[in-house]
Image: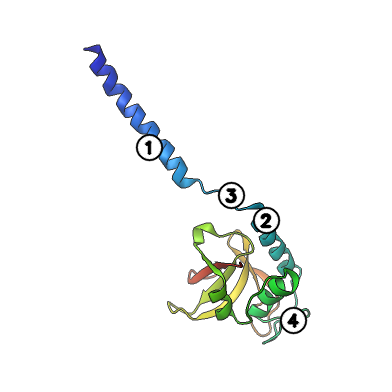
Amino acid sequence: MHTGILERRVAPRTLLAALAALLAVLLITPAPPADATTIGQQAVSVAAAQKGKPYKWGATGPSSFDCSGLVVYVYNTRMHKKLPRTASAQRRAATPVAKSQLRPGDLIFLHQGATSNVTHVGVYAGGGKIWHSPKPGGRVKLSTLWTTVWTAGRVK
């Protein structure tokens, strides 16, 4: 009779331990490879070094930028990665990234409404902020993401 009571007590504990172990595996995502983290941090540093430089439509640096021109300067000129010139083409060239997997150095593509048209791009700095060249009259700056209508991509 004591065996039956013991089995009933052990079974829930064993089940809870198994569920806790499964939950831990599902919630823990592996750390990014060291080289990926380094590249992303370098991209953020290069973007941050452009702080205060003026927006100029079509400009790719080093003294002025439009939004996609800043990304081209960061990745093509300084990081020696190959990205196309426009924000829409950069989105197509980048590897899509889930918002939950976002890392510094990833690209943030902003969209107009619910459409898939990319209207702006910036370099994710971490903490919900991006480095970007905002608009005519503006300067390269670090901003908190101001919309939820965006997607992310990682430079290959």
Q: Earlier in the sequence, mark 1 or mark 2?
A: 1
Q: Nearer the viewer, mark 3 or mark 2?
A: 2
Q: Quadrant of residue 145?
A: bottom right
Residue contact between numbered discs 3 and 2, judged by CB atoms under 8 Å: no
In-image side of 52 versus 90 (left or right)? right
Comes first in the chain, label 2 or label 4 = 2
CA distance for labels 2 and 4: 29 Å
Lower position in the chain sequence, tag 3 or tag 1 = 1
- Separation of disc 3 and disc 4 at Cα? 35 Å
**Which label number is shown at residue 19?**
1
Residue with the mark numbered 4:
64
SS class, disc 3: loop
What type is the residue that disc 2 sits on?
Answer: Asp
Q: Residue 25: give x, y in percent of width and height.
A: 46, 43
Q: Amino acid at mark 3?
A: Ala
Query: Mark 3 = which residue?
Result: 31
Q: Residues within 10 Å of mark 2 (few under 14, many from 20)?
A: few
Closer to the camera, 77 or 152? 77
* Residue that sits furthest to the top in the current view: 1
- Give the residue number, with chain letter if any, for mark 2: 35
Eye-nearest disc, 1 or 4: 1
**Where does the image place residue 30, in percent across and percent down from the top left?**
55, 48
Secondary element type, mark 2: helix
Q: Check contact, mark 3 vs mark 4: CB within 8 A.
A: no
Residue type of the residue flagged with mark 1 = Leu
